[in-house]
Image (spheres, rainbow, N blue to C red):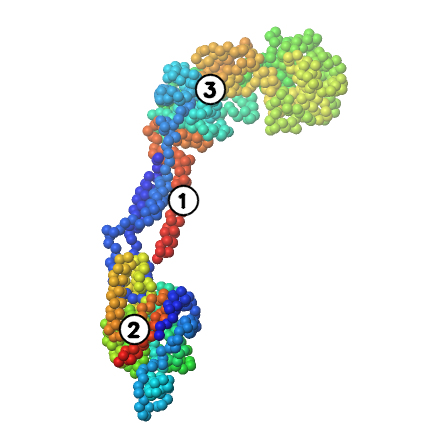
Amino acid sequence: MTWLFPFYLLGAAAVIAPILLHLRRRPPQDRVEFSSLLFLDAQTPIPVSKRRLENWLLLLLRCLALILLALMFARPFLRSESAASTSPDRATLILIDRSASMRRDDLWQRALDEAKRTAQSAKITDRVALAVFDQKLTPLWTFEEDRTSPAARTTEFPTRLAAHSPSWSATHLDRALIDAVALFDTNTASLKKHILLITDLQEGTHLDALRTIAWPADIRLQVHRLDPANADNLSLALAASESTTDTPVRPDASANTQASTIRTRLANTRDSRLRDFTLAWNDAPKSDSITAQLQPGASRILTAPPNSTNATTLTLTGDTQDFDNHLFIAPPQPRTVRIHFLGDNTTRDEAASPLYYLSRALQPTATLAPVLSADKKLPAQSPDIIFLSGATTNAETSTALRDFLTQGGFLVHVIASPNDATLIKTLTGLKDLTITDGDTTDDYRMLGEVNTAHPLLKPFADPRLRDFTKLRFWHHRFLQVPTLAKLPKPQGAGDSVPLETLASFDNGHPAILTARIGKGTLILLASGWHPGDSQFALSTKFVPLLYGWLAAAGFSHDPAASLIVGDALPLEATQAHTITDPDNKTHTLKPGQTFTTELIGLHTIATASRKQTVAVNLPPDEGRVLPLEPQKLADYGIKLAASVDLDSTTASADQQRLSATETEQRQRSWWWILLILLAVLLLETWLAGRNRQTALQTA
Amino acid sequence: MPISPHMSSATTFLDPAALMRIKSLELRAKVVVEGLWKGMHRSPYHGFSVEFSEYRAYVQGDDPRYIDWKVLARSDRTYIKKFEDETNLRCQLVIDHSKSMGYGSQSYTKADYAATLAATLASFLMKQGDAAGLTTFAEGIEEHLPPRNRPGHLRRMITELERPAKATGTSLAVSIGQLADLLRKRGMICLITDLLAPIEHLEKQLALLGAMGHDLVLFHLMDRTEIDFTFEKSAHFRDAESGAERFIDPQLARETYLKRLAAHREQIQQSCDRYNVEYHWCPTDKPLEEVLFTFLSARQRKKASKSSAKFAA
């Protein structure tokens, strides 16, 4: 029995009052009228020695009431919940945090020691299980194993734990706890369930998923918080997170400046004594480093220093905790896209020619390096994309283009004259296709209907970019397929899929058509982009459309997403990969397999055709290392064990009092005392009333 | 002449408490007297008012009216039947009106009892043609009605009796001294009091009244609690007359009280014996008829002894 406010127990001393009152024989206040005092003498009051307790039962009740009152105010509660010696057998799940922040100081070793100590102090009838967690839970020793060989646990724990060390992952305590609840099996049903959480309980711990569950009432969580010598830490992370995918793609943004705009986010912990830091690329000259100050609790965005040595690691120095001081940046590795313009290369600089605009639109970016060739013949090596505008083709070229398409090529064909019908017939196999000049009047056409939902028009899926109403077309060709119009809408997605209209003019003539030819894609434009045909090349829609087609052809412009530990590497499902991790271990993956990153650093993904380097960084939340109060977990509905076992000496009396208050509030023993007190008072009133009545009757 | 024995059976007496419930004092007296009369009709006793004194030989000059013709016829001698007093008995009822008489543990007080006793006596006497008077006293004489036997006189007496006591102290000696001055003619004096006062001076006055030829009867009234002192709880006891308070534990005080009371009564008894005062002990729970009956029978015995003594002389 413990008291929340033991000071109130002094109030029990008030029992002296009723005892004294009962000792004091009250001189009778009654007055009796009598005929004469002739024969009566005055008497002295009763001497003190004759005093004795009267109505001892009443006195007892009154004393009891006062004592109960004092007890009630002292707010008693039982600490028995934490007393292991008196409790029945317990099922304890030891849950050890192995997130990256456990790399600090000797936290991991202390965690192992605590786990061992708990395992050794457990009785043989107790059930003990062991699991480690970072972003997922890994059971090391289950309750079932413990049931079959409980004696082995002391020897097994160290060996199994030795195989694990702190990872580079984030701390997903919420997922770990939810999974840990499921580890309690039927063997532990009758035992007192208990989770011993050994963790540094840093600020960056993920807890949100705990809100989605109702914590089981019979499982208590005991938090053993490991505090390092000090929580001072400077952390480095990539700023302007890649999650902003809804921003419009800007392929025309200067690709050359990409490397210089790495923004980093630096943060200092609250109450930190650290101020000065240095940010530098590995092996960079000292002149390229940034040395500055960061106030405690502050964070700031800093542009990375110039990377003159093409280093891949940005290092922060200035604090003792090294685990979150490195930022890996994959070197720029633009993909080469071979684009062939079937036409006259000499028109490259003629403002009226389609090639002129094409060559200016296809500028290299951080991820793409378009190589535009132009010739009237097809090149020897098959290009990735072929543009065809205004060139006349012979039958041989037509067949070659058809082969190019069926093998998975991407062909954009601008219908320049009715003569192109032959080529298109060859490509699509539609025999009754006719092409005429669309409009002979001087009037211009605009786009009437645009199917922006189509994958080939993906750049325009954003509602802000859908405005085609200012685009004027002077000339266009009218492609007609009579049999196609009669046919119902195509069902399958095979070769037989004929032409599909992506956009049409306001007079109903198709403007952009597409067809799948074999593995390849054919795009037909009824009007060219050069000024002779339309305003298209000069409009803001042209470049996004081009890059959309490049993406559709497999050359995405999107910068490689910056990955954090625990993310899956971006792999192509159809190809086999060989992955080299930062430890230079090689993993060979079959098509369709995925690879989840576990280490920070540069990963190399190699396929048959290309090699790519991906940077994997520490989850930024791991850098927030300030310890949380274990009471915070109670806010998520978790039932904490009565005594929150704090490892550090900083566990103040306030925290202990808080936990005592909570225990007391849960037990609510004062409520029962109040009930007893009321009962005693009722009894006292009744007894006193009865005594008085008998006294009146005898008088 | 003895009164028929069945009168002594207490069962026929009215319970004083029941009697006192009758509001009207007149009616109360009537009830008692009626009961008493009923018993008396069975006896040849016809009252004591005609005070037969002696026979003496007729001498010339005597009124021939008083010659006892029966004796003359029987013995051929002329005797004159001599009466003690030619008038009826003059009875003065002297009632203590002090505050102490206002005490009573039952539903009625000693004063109620005394008033009923007086009214009954008066009613009884006047019914048989005697004169009754009333004197109330406390520290001195308060009211005085000389003995008379007239229609309406009983009424006046009863009105006087119903007046509540208001005086504080009792001075029996002073009152009796004053009374001696007022009562010039010989008669009977019925003193109804609780005698809760020192009696040193009382003796002298009683002796004076006796010497004046008055026939003295003392009705000593006491409440049952005054006799037994049956209190249980300690309390402040307040004197009804003086208002003085004393803290008394009855348990401790009872013994002394009873001893002193017994001594007091003893003293009274002795005084009464010494001065030939007829003493009647009247606890207020005693039926009134019984008191009256005892009184009447005692009177009868006294007369009998007196006349026999005279005859013997």
Q: Which residue is mark 2?
A: B278
Q: CA distance from mark 2 to mark 1?
A: 68 Å
Mark 3 residue element:
loop
Q: Chain of mark 2?
A: B
Amino acid type for the residue under numbered disc 3: Val
Q: Which of the 4 quarters of the picture holds residue A672?
A: top left
Pick the front one: B204 or A216: B204
Q: Chain of mark 1?
A: A
Q: Residue at x 60, y 12 (%)?
A: A384
Q: Which residue is mark 1?
A: A679
Q: Chain of mark 3?
A: A
Pick the front one: A188 or A492: A188
Residue B197 image offset from top left, x and y in percent = 27, 70
Work out which residue is located at the far front of the displayed protein and give it: B75
Disc 3 crowd rating (10 Å Cα; few below 14, some 14-19, many 20+) is many
Circle 2 or circle 3, nearest the eye: 2
- Residue A528 in view here: yes
Disc 1 crowd rating (10 Å Cα; few below 14, some 14-19, many 20+) is few
Q: Are marks 2 and 3 in contact (CB under 8 Å)?
A: no
Circle 1 or circle 3, nearest the eye: 1
Disc 2 crowd rating (10 Å Cα; few below 14, some 14-19, many 20+) is some
Q: Residue at x 63, y 12 (%)?
A: A409
Work out which residue is located at the far bottom of the displayed protein and give it: B61
Pick the front one: A451 or A34: A34
Q: Decide if residue A363 is on the left or right side of residue B231.
A: right
Residue B29 image offset from top left, x and y in percent = 41, 73
Amino acid type for the residue under numbered disc 2: Glu
Q: Which residue is mark 3?
A: A565
Q: Earlier in the sequence, mark 1 or mark 3?
A: 3
